[in-house]
Structures are given as C-alpha cells and as structure tokens.
Image (cartoon, rainbow, N blue to C red):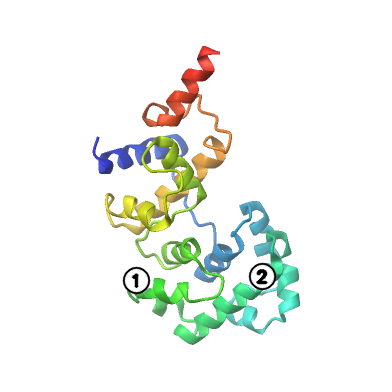
Amino acid sequence: MHMRDRLSEIYDRLVERYGPQNWWPADTPIEVMVGAVLTQASSWTNVEQALANLRDADALSSQAIRDMPLPELARLVYPSGYYNAKARKLKALCKFLHDFCEDDIDRMAFRPTQELRIELLRVYGIGNETADDILLYALGHPIFVVDTYTRRLMHRIGVVEERVNYPKLQALFMDNLPSDAQYFNEFHALIVRHSVVACKKSPECEGCPILDICEFGTSNVQVSSSQ
C-alpha cells in the first residue's frame, strides 16, 4: 500500500472510531500559544488548571503576561510543572509577539509559514513541536505537529524507526497528505486521542481500529492469544 493510502486509511479509521476532536480547546490564539508552552512535559489536565489560573487573574493576554512580575506568573502556571522555566518562556514568547507584530496575531498569521517557523524557533523555550503547535493551532498554517504520541504510533505501525527525528517524521505526513491545516489539525488530534485511550506506553491492542495494519499490534495480539 502506498504511504499516502496508508496514512489516509489510518485517519479514516481513527475518525470513524473517535469522531471529530475539534482541537485545540481554546478561545483565542494567545490562549493556544500559552497552552502550547505549558503543555511541554505536562498532562493536559494540569495545563487546564494553569490556564484557568491565568484566566481568573485576567492574564491571558500578551501584554498582561509581559507586565506581570515573574514570581506571580510562575505561581499561576505552577500546576503545569517546571513553573519557573515556563514563566520565563511565556515572558519570552510575549516579548516576541510585541516585537514581531505588536501583538497583532491576525497580522502575524499572514506571514509565510517557514518565515514564521524560523522566527518562533529563535524564541527562548520554543522548539519544533511548540513552534508547530502555534503555527497549526493558533495561526492556521498547514504544518503537521509531531510529538511523542505520533512517534510511538507510527513506529508501532511499522512506518518509521523508533528514534526517527522530527523533520523526517513530519515530512512523512506532509509529503503524503493534502496540505490542509484542518486536516492536519484533526489527524494530529486523533493520534493524541488514540494514544491516550488505546496506544499507551502499555498498549491495549484488543479492539484497536487499526490493529490489522499495525505490525506491533498484530504481533502483540498473537503472542497474547498463544499464552
């Protein structure tokens, strides 16, 4: 099966099982950006608590984060973990937004994807995944987000090696799928959902919607049934 068809089959089966995910759960682009930083090495449940703290403090704006004393910001984002580092990262991001586009995120979104990506990667605390989260979910650019879930799932299916690097795995999706932000958005969200529900560190392969096209899954089920 051609890689394009293989990826499309995975998408179709996941969306049939889980339905539309409507990700990212945020009201504004700045909330998406803040969430993208806070979710680094953190569960979404903890990120939601940190976002709620910022919302309650009326601090979910670029200017509010810039103006807030660093210790206070760290206190508010405490639930997300690594709170001192994340407070500094949020400060750096919001300084960038002011310097780059005067906090006009709509204007920022019209800039070319690769130009924006280069600029974002220069910001303290923003790596490939966070930059692509911002580009896709906050700015609506067609770029595929790669994370631990994506890498684990695609390795288990048998498409890539376990330690595949970020650019190679991202290219696998972007070279074989339509360049469509909403499609990339939904596909990545479905991978996350499937990885949380079934394809965990210790996977639950029985009943998996992509079991028959997953090398690890078919092998795992055969071993289990023979014991």
Q: Is residue 209 visible?
A: no
Does any portion of residue 163 appear in the rendered image?
A: yes
Q: How packed is label 2: few (under 14 Cα within 10 Å), some, or many (20 or more)? A: few
Q: Position of residue 180 (x, y in %)?
A: 31, 57
Q: Height in image: 222 above or below 131?
A: above
Specify the amino acid type for callout 2: Ala
What residue is shown with label 1?
Answer: 114
Per the image, the residue denoted by label 2 is 85
Using the numbered discs, state the Cα–Cα distance from disc 2 to disc 1 in whole angstroms.
26 Å
In the picture shown, does residue 5 fall above or below 72? Answer: above
Residue at image position (42%, 68%) is: 139
Q: Residue furthest top?
A: 226
142 vs 35, left or right, is left
Among the two numbered marks 2 and 1 on one chain, the one whose residue lies closer to the N terminus: 2
User: Percent from the top left, x then y, of residue 192?
Assistant: 50, 46
Residue situated in front as seen by the camera: 71 or 61: 71
Q: What kind of residue is marked 1? A: Gln
